Each structure stands twice: as C-alpha cells, then as structure tokens.
Image (cartoon, rainbow, N blue to C red):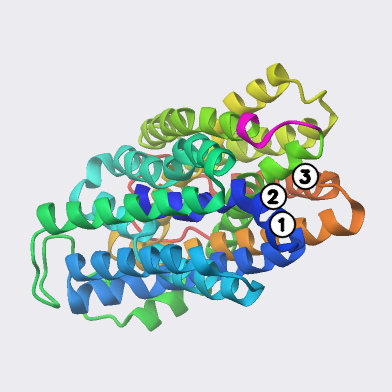
Amino acid sequence: MLATAAAIGAPGVLIIPLSQEFGWSTASISSALAVRSVLFGLMGLAAAPLMNALGLRRVMLAALLLVGTGLLASLAMTRIWHLVLLWGALIGIGSGATALVLGATVATRCFPRRSGFVMGVLGAGAAAGPLVVLPAISALAEAGGWRAAVFALVVLAALAAVAVLVLVPEESGGADDGLGRIGRSGGNEPAAIALHGAARSGIFWVLLGTFAICGAATSGLVQTHFVPFCADYGLSSFRAANVLALMGPLAVLGSLGAGWLSDRFDGGWLLFWFYGLRGLSLLCLPFTDFSLTALAVFGMFYGLDWIATVPPTVKLIVLRFGRERATLILGWIFAGHQFGAAAAVFAAGHLRDASAGYLPAFLVAGVLCLFAAAALPVLSVPAGSGLGGRDRT
C-alpha cells in the first residue's frame, strides 16, 4: 500500500520539471492526474471481487506490474497523451487495486474489537507513502532530472513485488482466507441489493459527500498542488517537499490517534472537529508569510489531521450498515473520495492557469471542509453503542 501510494503522490513534485521540459501547462498535467484519481477510485470498487476470484497475491502482483510499467514507460514519453495513458490510466488502475478497501477488509474482519486502530495503522501506510518519499524524489529530480526520480519509483515498486512474492501466501481463487467474502455483503445477499439498501439512507450520502471533500482537500489539492503553490511564493521545490515530508510521520501519528479515539468516542463528533480544523487551516495558509516557520506550523497541524478522518469514517460505516456490508459500502465511499480528489486536481490546475495563483482553490477547499463539519454531527453514534448496522434514521 505504501509503495503504490508513493507512485500516486510523487507527481506533486514533478509538475514543475515536466512543465519546464515539455512546455505543458499546469492545467494539462492536472487533467492527466485527475484521470488517475478517477480510475484509482473506480478500481477500488473492482478490487474486492478480483481478490475473491484471483486471490490476493495475484491481484497485488498485477497491480505492481501496472504501476511499474506505467512508470518505466513514462521515461520515454514526449506527448501529453502519454502522460494521460501512463500516469493517468496505468498507475491509477494499478494503485487502486491496493487501496483503502484492502486495509478496511483486514481491519474489520480480522480485528473487530480494534478495527479503528488497525485501520489507522494501514491507512497511515497508504497515506504516508507519498509524503515520506517526496523529499528524496524532489532531491533526485533537482540533481538528475525528473527521470531519475521516476526510475527510483520503479525500483520501489520492484522491491514491493519481491516482498509480495516472498511473504504473501498463494491463494486459490475464491477461497475464503479468513477475511470473509468481500465481494458479497453478507450471507447470500447480492452486493447490488446491499448497495441499493444503503443508498436509500441519508447517512450514506452524508458520508459519501464528506469523504469526497476529504479527498479534494488532501490528495487532490495539498498532495498534488502544494509544491507548485509554494513555488509561486518563491519557495524551492525541495523545501516545499520537506514540508510535505514533515506531514508523513505526523499523518501516521494522527491516524493512530484517530483510530484509538474512534474506538472510544463518538465518530460523528470526531469528524466534526477533524474537518472543521482542517478547513480553518486551509483558509489561513494563503494569508501567511510563507516563511519556513509558518509552513512548518501548517505542516505539523495538517499532517496530524491528514488521514485522521479515515478510522472514524470506517467505524461509522460498520456501526451504521453492519460488519458484513462495511467493505462494500466503504468501496463506494472511497470512490467518492477519489472523485473529489480528481475534481480538486483538475480545478486547481485550471484555476492556477486562469488566475496565476492557487488562492481560490485553497479558499474553496477550506469552505467545503467547514460545510462537511457542519453536516457530520447527524452521524453521531457512540463508539460502544453496538448499533450494528441499523440506520437510526
């Protein structure tokens, strides 16, 4: 999860080098990255049935092969459609197969009493990947060009594939490996019927909408556009990448802390605070002096909040819709997260080219987070209530 997430996050520090070499606009590059986010989310929906049919090991190896192929072939790209095909389609599909649904399945099926904490651990691995590697990728790009940085990601994907071959046991397609049948919602109920039932609940749409805002504010805006945003204010790509790297270990701590809290406190109110504070930080950032001190404070705060929304969201899905349906429902909600990210990637790039700045994008994202915070108290369910899947609304 960490290795494929690194391939997703690295383009954030490569927008400027690509633009300088090929003359591509920020809007054009952002369009390719928006395709990546959409396919990443859609593949999250297909990943569970594929794992049931082919086995976990085969799906993981296929995902890493797609990511590695897309990265390696991009070393020779010269046209913008090459970027859309390789970084948009291949990397989007490959990384989506090892997305959040995989972690949620393990957390909810194997660790039901500590699912919030375990989801925090696995979510931290997925989210910390791009943040942790960004300084190294940025340094390689500055020293040897963007191709050296991409080749390093190819090596990382290859190492992950070796780890899968050595450590992940072979499975027969369709075997029940203890994680449960993740392509079905529980018992003999078809997945489509379970989804139809969930979609009639207002709770489902609140979770879908707020998690779409989560994707827009994090992987869509900050992860992709933070480095060029800082460059507009005279900060080097390497220093801006270091601020993002600061968020990496803090995102791990924030995710673990949020997981611990979601096992003990009301998930709806936890999300109210997480989204509300995130929105305020986004509204304040454009009006700082962009000194290293100001950016470090933003990085520390935003890092702790980066994936803190994941554990309570997963916990609420389990409480509202039941453990057997949780993975299926999360797949759709995670797809909404990536659609939100795609919209933010695309819109921020076009706004930047149209207005020569990212200020409107950060202000809109901040306001959307405040709207999400205002909507979340309706989800209030005490963590120990044992609601178990009956939607109280």
**What residue span does the magenta drawing correspond to?**
234-239
> Could you tell me the amino acid type at mark 2?
Ile
Q: Between tags 2 and 3, which lies in front?
A: 2
Question: Could you tell me how far apart the alpha carbons at marks 3 and 1 are, in whole angstroms?
Answer: 22 Å
Q: Residue at x 36, y 70 (%)?
A: 66
**From the viewer's perspective, is 55 left or right of 31?**
left
> Could you tell me the amino acid type at mark 3?
Phe
Q: Position of residue 147 (x, y in %)?
A: 51, 54
CB-based contact (under 8 Å), mark 1 and mark 2: yes
Residue at which label 2 appears: 16
Q: Position of residue 259 (x, y in %)?
A: 38, 36
Inspect the magenta stretch and tell me whether residue 237 lies in it: yes
Residue 245 in sight in this render: yes
Q: Residues within 10 Å of mark 3 (few under 14, many from 20)?
A: many
Query: Does residue 57 lie above or below 114 as drawn?
Result: below
Q: Nearer the viewer, residue 152 or 299?
A: 152
Query: Does residue 253 lie above or below 99 as drawn?
Result: above
Q: Earlier in the sequence, mark 2 or mark 3?
A: 2
**From the viewer's perspective, is 45 left or right of 337?**
left
Question: Could you tell me how far apart the alpha carbons at marks 1 and 2 are, in whole angstroms?
Answer: 5 Å
Q: Residue at x 77, y 62 (%)?
A: 25
Residue at which label 1 appears: 19
> Could you tell me the amino acid type at mark 1?
Ser
Residue at which label 3 appears: 362
